Image (tube, helix red, strand yellow):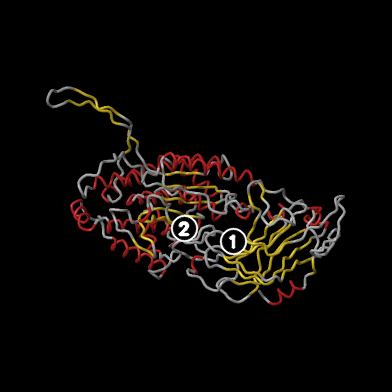
């Protein structure tokens, strides 16, 4: 902070003992009570450092002097005159971190308290009235001044203040070893002229209750469905979601998010579907310039990295995808089975790693570049811990920070993330990164849409409107019976279990109605699903037994035309023909989706 700016702040007038006729200008409430706060675990530790006073009153309402402080109470008349608030503090942290890439986990907050005797945030409609001011100085053992966010008169903080409330400054730390040391601070209160405030009405408080209700409705349905299918893991609401900071109604433009299913070589169909949307919605633009977040699993995760972290065009992705698939999945059934018997996997992960590293170097200049990129386009992929794949949710591997959830592997490299999300059991060996051995994220979230929704809540908050949730599949697979495990190396058995793990339509069916009905901007269509499939109606077939020539009828249930297995490069020609046909048939759907992207 420049010395001149600090000198101006130090020159601010003290907030007066009687604010009933306060003149316009800048005032300050100061604190020089040195304080240290240290977190013990992943739970946020928060303590009040100092707070604004409240005028004491007799029972008849007449004001009396307070022996606690000289500053004036925040009564209703004073609140109405406040133009802006800002905290400026002198502080530092512990000076080091085991994983600096995981982010800064000490910060300052402004909190509304019910009264001068309260020490917990006031709660409105189930939401804590808490807003982050600013991060603490990062990795420094020396004190320094940092300016916090400026809260303007139409900000929720000022709109939520009521007569008799108190504004408090809170110190916060999270995760073992993180400390915040605070020495001095000024809470700057800027008062506007009475004439200005008579002409401009402050907006009413935001409807937190409505927002909370919609979010809880969606989560309740998710919980019921996962309970009915006995899922060992499920998307859950981010910790700290019900804080006013995350429910800010700042009027930002609606979000656009992209979810990409897994499906092996069939991901080529996803790219062509995305191309059809982009051509109509934003010709000449890259997906990373249109979507606010891109998430994917397995094949979809690999594509998410190309589109988001590597900022590739759809056409570039299609070209690379075609080149890679031919080089990676180039074995016949005999060679595949032999490799499985001797190595435990059908394919050599070394080829996959080499191709990914070449692409990363081509796009970033460094084959070992990290997935995390400060200020980059938000993209994430998902992988599953091999040690606990049955009772843990997928692990998020992010190109960005999520302040609600510390990344377990913040230093993971791009190629490692791509390998992890693609490490389908029986197809490729797992990959070990740090303390984790990771396998294909498709085992826990082959359609990552539910996880994408919770991630959007944590990063952008539940009040932020969304104009487009675009979910793209890799083709409706034909019926696949779940066979009992048979002869070792039987590709049919592995294919059956892979098909079950890759069932993405349950998530689609569940999510489409929920998002349209309950997400911000309720009842507006905002969910779009593109997934190639040619339905075959149920039919009866007459057959004869060879030994008595007796007729009997075989009933075939409705089905979908086969789109090929995860590694069936030979089936891509038919799938591409089906994709082209689907794009023509779904012209109106694709056009409406494009309009929703353009409208945002």
Residue at which label 2 appears: 379
Which residue is rendered at x = 30% and y = 40% of the image?
A: 480
* Residue 347 against residue 222 in the figure, above or below: below
From the viewer's perspective, tell me whether residue 201 is left or right of residue 356: right
Q: What number is the disc on residue 332?
A: none
Q: Quadrant of residue 308?
A: bottom left
Residue at which label 1 appears: 45
Question: Which SS class for mark 2?
Answer: strand
From the viewer's perspective, tell me whether residue 475 is left or right of residue 309: left
Q: Position of residue 362 (x, y in %)?
A: 38, 67
Q: Position of residue 106 (x, y in %)?
A: 58, 65
Question: Which SS class for mark 1?
Answer: strand
- Residue nearer the viewer, 143 or 553: 143
Q: Quadrant of the N terminus?
A: bottom right
Badge 2: residue crowd in 10 Å (few <14, some 14–19, many ≥20): many
Q: Position of residue 119 (x, y in %)?
A: 68, 57
Count of all numbered marks drawn on residues in the image: 2
């Amino acid at each position: 902070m420049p010395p001149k700016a600090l000198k101006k702040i130090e020159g601010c007038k003290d907030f007066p003992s009687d604010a009933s006729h306060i003149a316009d200008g800048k005032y300050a409430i100061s604190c020089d009570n040195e304080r240290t706060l240290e977190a013990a675990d992943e739970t946020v530790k928060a303590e009040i450092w100092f707070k604004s006073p409240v005028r004491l009153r007799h029972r008849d309402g007449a004001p009396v002097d307070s022996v606690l402080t000289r500053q004036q109470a925040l009564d209703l008349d004073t609140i109405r005159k406040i133009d802006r608030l800002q905290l400026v503090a002198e502080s530092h942290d512990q000076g080091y971190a085991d994983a600096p890439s995981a982010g800064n986990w000490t910060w300052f907050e402004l909190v509304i308290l019910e009264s001068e005797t309260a020490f917990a945030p006031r709660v409105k409609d189930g939401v804590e009235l808490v807003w982050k001011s600013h991060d603490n100085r990062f990795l420094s053992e020396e004190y320094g001044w940092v300016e916090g966010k400026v809260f303007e008169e139409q900000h929720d903080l000022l709109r939520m203040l009521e007569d008799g409330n108190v504004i408090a400054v809170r110190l916060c730390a999270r995760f073992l070893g993180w400390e915040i040391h605070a020495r001095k601070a000024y809470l700057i209160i800027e008062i506007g002229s009475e004439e200005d405030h008579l002409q401009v009405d402050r907006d009413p408080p935001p409807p937190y209750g409505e927002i909370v209700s919609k979010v809880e409705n969606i989560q309740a349905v998710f919980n019921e469905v996962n309970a009915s299918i006995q899922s060992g893991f499920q998307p859950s609401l981010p910790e700290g979601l019900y804080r006013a900071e995350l429910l800010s109604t700042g009027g930002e433009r609606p979000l656009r998010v992209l979810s990409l299913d897994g499906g092996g070589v069939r991901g080529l169909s996803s790219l062509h579907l995305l191309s059809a949307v982009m051509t109509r919605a934003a010709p000449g633009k890259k997906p990373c310039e249109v979507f606010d977040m891109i998430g994917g699993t397995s094949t979809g995760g690999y594509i998410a990295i190309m589109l988001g972290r590597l900022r590739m065009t759809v056409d570039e992705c299609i070209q690379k995808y075609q080149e890679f698939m031919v080089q990676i999945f180039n074995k016949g059934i005999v060679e595949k089975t032999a490799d499985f018997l001797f190595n435990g996997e059908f394919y050599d992960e070394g080829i996959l790693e080499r191709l990914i590293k070449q692409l990363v170097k081509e796009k970033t200049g460094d084959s070992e570049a990290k997935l995390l990129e400060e200020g980059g386009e938000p993209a994430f992929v998902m992988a599953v811990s091999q040690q606990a794949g049955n009772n843990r949710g997928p692990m998020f591997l992010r190109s960005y920070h999520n302040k609600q959830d510390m990344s377990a592997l913040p230093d993971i490299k791009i190629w490692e993330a791509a390998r992890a999300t693609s490490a389908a059991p029986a197809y490729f060996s797992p990959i070990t990164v740090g303390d984790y051995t990771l396998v294909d994220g498709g085992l826990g979230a082959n359609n990552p849409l539910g996880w994408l929704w919770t991630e959007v809540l944590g990063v952008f908050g539940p009040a932020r409107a969304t104009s487009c949730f675009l979910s793209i599949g890799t083709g409706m697979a034909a019926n696949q019976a779940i066979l009992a495990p048979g002869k070792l190396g039987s590709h049919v058995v592995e294919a059956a279990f892979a098909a079950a793990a890759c069932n993405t339509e349950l998530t689609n069916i569940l999510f489409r109605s929920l998002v349209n009905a309950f997400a911000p901007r309720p009842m507006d269509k905002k969910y779009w699903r593109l997934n190639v499939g040619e339905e075959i109606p149920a039919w009866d077939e007459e057959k004869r037994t060879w030994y008595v020539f007796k007729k009997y009828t075989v009933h075939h249930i409705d089905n979908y035309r086969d789109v090929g297995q995860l590694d069936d490069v030979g089936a891509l020609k038919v799938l591409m023909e089906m994709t082209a046909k689907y794009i023509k048939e779904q012209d109106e759907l694709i056009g409406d989706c494009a309009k929703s992207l353009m409208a945002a």
